[in-house]
Image (spheres, helix red, strand yellow):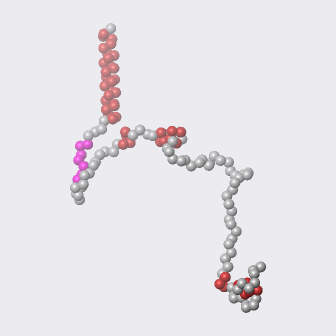
Amino acid sequence: MLLCALPRTALAQDHIDQMIENQRAMFHVEPENKRCPRDPLNDAIVVCRRDHSDHYRIPSTQEEHPESPEARRTGQLAPPDIYGLAPCTGVCIKGGYAPPPVYYFDITALPEPEPGSDAWKIAHGEMPAP
C-alpha cells in the first residue's frame, strides 16, 4: 500500500511546487537595480519606481458592469433618462413663446408742442391727460 501512495505524493508535491512558482511569478515584484538619475540643477530628492499598477489592480464594478445597481451608487445625482419617453404628440406642457416685440420711440426727436394746444396744456399740467 505504501508503494502505491508514494508516486501520488510525489505528483501532488510537484503540482504544489508548480502552483507556488506560478504565484511567485505572478505577484513577485522585481527589485529595482537601477538608481534614479540625479537632478543636476538642484539637490532635490527624486523618487523613481516602475509603474505596474494596472497589473496589480482589481477592476471596479463600474468598469465591469456599468449598468448594475452597485455601479450606479456613486453618491452623485444622475440625470434623468429622457430618451425612453414618448414624444410630445398629445397634451404636453410646452415651454413659453417669444414675447411680442417692444417698440422704441425716440421722444427727443418729437417737435415741441405749440403753445395753447392740448399737448402743451397737458405737458404743463393745465389739462388732465385723456
Residue lying at 69% horizontally and 71% vertically, measured from the top left: 101
Q: Work out whether 117 lies above or below 129.
A: below
What percent of the width, then of the height, locates residue 92?
71, 52
Residue 65, percent from left and from top: 50, 39
Q: Quadrant of residue 30?
A: top left
**Residue at the image point whose x is 65% and y is 47% from the top:** 85
The number of numbered badges drawn on the structure is: 0
Q: Nearer the viewer, residue 8 or 54?
A: 54
Residue 126 falls left or right of residue 44:
right
The picture places residue 102, in percent across and down from the top left corner, at 68, 72
- Is 119 situated left or right of 35 in this image? right
Is 113 in front, or is 13? 113
Q: Is residue 119 visible?
A: no
Q: Which residues are magenta?
A: 32-38
Residue at 23%, 47% (x, y): give it.
Answer: 35
Give the percent coordinates (x, y) of residue 10.
Answer: 30, 18
> Along the line of sight, which residue is nearer the eye, 78 or 61?
78
Q: Where is 102 relative to 65, above or below?
A: below
107 sits to left or right of 33: right
| View extreme (top): residue | 1
Residue 105 on the magenta segment = no
Location of the N terminus by quadrant is top left
Residue 94: quarter of image: bottom right
Q: Residue at x 76, y 88 (%)?
A: 117
Magenta residues, dominant SS class: loop
Q: Is residue 73 visible?
A: yes
- Figure check: 85 above or below 8: below
Closest to the observer, 4 or 104: 104
